Amino acid sequence: MDFLVGLFTDFGQQILSSVTAAFAIAAIGLNVHFGYTGLVNIGQAGFMLIGAYGLAITVEVGGGFWLGVLIGLVGAALFALVLGLPTLKLRGDYLAIVTIAASEIVRVIGDNQSLSQWTGGAAGIAGRVYQGAFTALSPFPANQQFQVGPYTYPLTEGDSWFLRIVCWVVLAIVAVIVLLLMRSPWGRAIRGIREDEDAMRSLGKNVYLYKLQALMLGGVIGAIGGMLYVLSANVLADSLGRTTTFLLYTCLLLGGAATVFGPVLGSALYFIVIIGLNDVVAQFVPPQIMNEQQIPQFGWIVVGVGLMLLVIFRPQGILGNKKELAFGD
Amino acid sequence: MRSLTTLRRVLLGSATVAAVLAGALAGAAPATAASPSPSPSVTAVPTAGTTTVVQATADCAVTPRIACVRGALRDDNGNGVKGVTIRLDGASGATASAVSNAAGAFVFTVTKGGTYRITLVTSTLPKGIKPLAAASRPIPVTLGQLQPAAFALKGTFKGSQTTSGPSTSELHLVLDQISGGLLLGLLLALASIGLSLIYGTTGLSNFAHGEQVTLGGLLAWLFAVVLGWNFLLACVVTVLLCAASGYLQDRFIWGPLRRRHLGLTQLMVVTIGLSLALEYVFQYFAGAQVHPVTTSIQINTGPLDLTPNAYLAMLISIVVLVAVGLLLQRTRIGRATRAVSDNRPLAAASGIDVDRIIRLVWTVSMGLSGLAGILYALVYGGINWSTGQAVLLLLFAATTLGGLGTAFGALIGSLIIGLVVQVSSLFLSGDMRYATALIILILVLLVRPQGILGRRERVG
Amino acid sequence: MPAHRRGRMLTAWALGAAAAVTLAACSTPSGGSSASTSASASTSASASAAATPAATIAAATQCASGADPKTQFKLGTFLPLTGSLAFLGPAAVGGAGLALQDVNAAGGVNGKPACSIPTDSSDADNPTVGSTNVKKLLQAKVSAILGAESSSVSEAVLPTVAATGTVMFSPANTDDALSGASKWYFRDAPPNSVEGNALGKQIVADGNQKVGMLVFNDSYGTNLRDATQKAIEASGGAVVYGAKGKNQEFSSKETNFSSQVSAVLATKPDAIVIIAFDQTAQIVPALVSAGWKMSKSYLVDGNLNDYTKTFPANTMNGAQGTTQGVNPSAAFKQKVQAWYSKAGGSTITSYSYSAEAYDAVVLMALAADRGGDSSSATIQSNLLAVSGANGGTVCKSYSACSALIKKGTKSIHYEGFAGIGPLNAKHDPSSGYISVYQYVGNNDSKFVNSVRG
């Protein structure tokens, strides 16, 4: 019983955490690409990384928090423009290969020592360098813990109540914007492109332009997710690489692509599954069968197989509608 | 080794004794005479009661109450300069002189900390050698620490041998990288041809292709190193198992999914899931460390300055690639494969058993990837769970560059990517060279999206 | 290789194949998703149960949920179990596990058995794993966290951990930037500046003036390189390859070292320093193949491993390496391996940071003993005093030290297996002693001497 109470307390705190919200936001961005427009972007982590660098480096050189946010967003929009211009006229898998390559290039440049006076190279930018600019905005007192139910967090520092509130408010705003956009003529147009590009073209729509706009919008949302994520971590090029993009896909497909709340539900569920799996296995499987090191490895195997099964048997995810499927040919 | 160390100490010791004696006999350095003249003993630790705080010794081991001042004199060829006197003077008149041994090394044992002045007695330098910087400078000496006291020298002494190390000319370096690039390109080609054929016949971008390379390397490690089988046998079994994995994958995963008419994007995400699962299956069973497929180390030889294993790997790659090429060009089944790759519905309509061809493509592709993994591990000293993940983007770059879906394009693309990755390390830092390959990939897509050998209509 | 491991490996591979097949079968509509995993788990259960007698050592120290951290010492371990640093995991897991076993054998902390919650810190590539697990540990209100190994991962979670007032004690972080990073952060691996200083001086004192450095691009690699380069240059030597700002580091994901090796040899170095982790197993063959004599090579604490089974005999002959404190003794390694085998683990190949993990756990347990309770605040305020920061009676094991504390000795100095000396005001190890090792015929290293860094 104690075990179950502990497990569910863990679930709750993970759902409410800022990381879940940040990844849900990035997944919403990916949803704009993949779910609504049908663009296969395998470099969403690159957009997150650009947002994170934009914020952290600007604060680091004294530009202030809001300028940092602005630069991060503009950077992501430009990145989308550069990627989209040459590739959106080509077949879909070219965009996939270009986005994965481009985000890898961003990662390698971030890791590289030649820019380390700004990026910190492979060591990254430590949280204490730029997080002060954010915690300074907190209306709550510093160095105090606050308890709600079983959850005690600092009010201002680290993964605080302040950060959690900001993350979830931003998430709500982003979700509402996407919801409204998708109900607008613009949203209908991009969903039309996903269903049948040629039909949209024959209606006189500039398909290329719509795709480019969608790529930029989703990228900017990804950058917001990246910034919120690094507010409780550090900016590290390797941490926002291919693995993170794959994780975002898992979250998105789990919740349901082309739905507004799918990415949010998917992110929350993803973390719950990971925690639950590790805890249950650690609790009930003796070490002779699976030692301490093999338990989390086993968890990842299950995630991989789970992703395969999910896409095969329930491609619309939990909330999705089978009629409105993001997977075209 | 214990005896080796002792031997080395004895040799060092006798050399120093000889050198010190030679210095004393010659009487060339007045400083030696003026010093409180410690007996030219070679005991490493001064005996209790002596007032000497600084001594030239044969060797020195740091302890909390002893500091060692050590250095060596070398000429431009890297040879030790022997017979040179070095003086170490302390604040309270303590002084000692050491004469460099055959390796150019000199050692002082100091039992009192403080600032000392170390001086290279330039008159004792052989002809043709000059100090590069000041011949005398103060050095801090702290008990319990090692204090290096090197003097950089310029020039060579008479009879100094040029070391017979690896040739290091610019040209040689360039050739080195080109031969390395060819080798890498051929290994990539083995894997990327499969990737390209699968793409050509099914339209699938297989993100789990890198893991098939890893699988080959790890299976070879299991058989050849863990179980100690004969290497060739291990290779054959590994390739067969990898080919079988391709067959089974198509039989039980990709074939049924094709029949369910899953979209290509959907299938691509399935391969992402598979790659994730496989990576951790490797960690689960084989651990995360680098596993070698052989524990021997060979010396580079021959015109390309590669190891015999590397030549062998290149030869095997070429033979296999030529065989695959002939298979595609000359045989019925090869022509059928190309037909499926060109236009699947048309091929099906003309009576080709498309599913059978695709199953064959999967089987051969995975066998080739497994072979690539074995050779990769053989040539580059081992493989771990993430090696395939690291080469996957190079494989994609190679196939896209050559033209998605064309086998010969993949070969040419691989060779170009291999060369670019190796040769660009002459100009770019180590971790940027992979970015170069990816930047080339993006640029090619801008200029010629269909790749070098691809055809226009595939693109839009 | 011990027979039991070979057996496990075989079973494992066979299982992998079986799982792949079952998994493949799932794609047909009739297959069930859970069937494959549960089937493989049960097969493996029966196979292993036959091989090893059922003994549940590790499970015994697992914390029950809801245990009060004030009265029971709850250790949250946060070590790399998956990902690119996972090869370092077994050594630290074993060290920490052995320490808990020794603590409990001596009666536990404040008379109650200590327990642990093991979690995975993963690596920089998987940031969500670390953040998820650290929050899990904080939610469980652990007395202290042991980890992380990667400096980058520590940096990533430190803001969160410090804000909740929980002790985080790393057995392996060496990045200089972490010195005094937070009052809640401790480590018993020395900052790179100490080791780099000793290593750089050793290289030049051995008569090398032109030094090539093969450095992997990671905070550990570049930070230690900077410190070593500083010492080399201050002693009159020069770094001819891999120097700071030259941009010649190799990626931590590098799999092919031929171009780096050609490039470093082209600079005609007198000596080569290899600053890397596991990549060393691939770098050394590449160097040797290109004609380099390993006797003029230097290794660092991250790769000063036993290469007996990796390379042909005499390959490493004469190569030297530095490490903080002392390398753990053979007896210690055997005990760690014995514990790890009992906990279901296989053969440990690298013992890097094993002794540090052991000492960190013992130090935190002693701090809880000294303060009278196991809360994080108590451990934080007592850690320096038990590490010998105020001097005091020297003791060498948990049982001896806790006996001293029970007798009322205020200041003690726990001298563990890593030889780190007291922790200083910045919560770094202060001894600053760096041991120099030299490789001998069978590719294992022998202690040469200890120098102050």
Image (cartoon, helix red, strand yellow):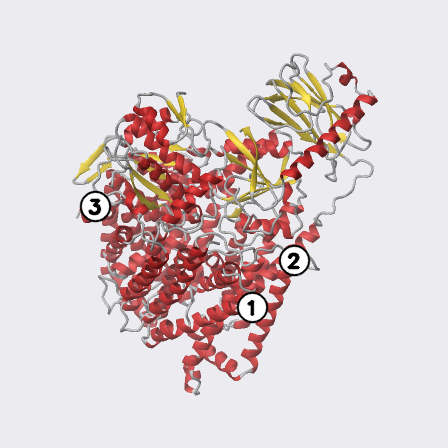
The amino acid on which the numbered mark 1 sits, given as a three-letter code, is Leu
Reading the image, the residue beneath label 2 is B306
Discs 1 and 3 share one subunit:
no
Chain letter of disc 1 in the image: B
In what element is the residue under mark 3? helix
Residue at 78%, 16% in the rendered image? B33
Reading the image, the residue beneath label 3 is A6
The amino acid on which the numbered mark 3 sits, given as a three-letter code, is Gly
| Tag of residue B411 | 1
Residue at 40%, 22% in the rendered image? C393
In the current view of this chain or complex, which residue is farthest to the bottom? B351
Dot 1, crowdedness within 10 Å: few (<14), some or many (≥20)? many
- Marks 2/1: CA distance? 21 Å
Q: Are marks 2 and 1 in contact (CB under 8 Å)?
A: no
Residue sitting nearer the eye, C266 or C420: C420
In terms of image quadrants, where is residue C94? Answer: top left
**Residue C285 image offset from top left, x and y in percent:** 60, 52
- Marks 1/3: CA distance? 56 Å
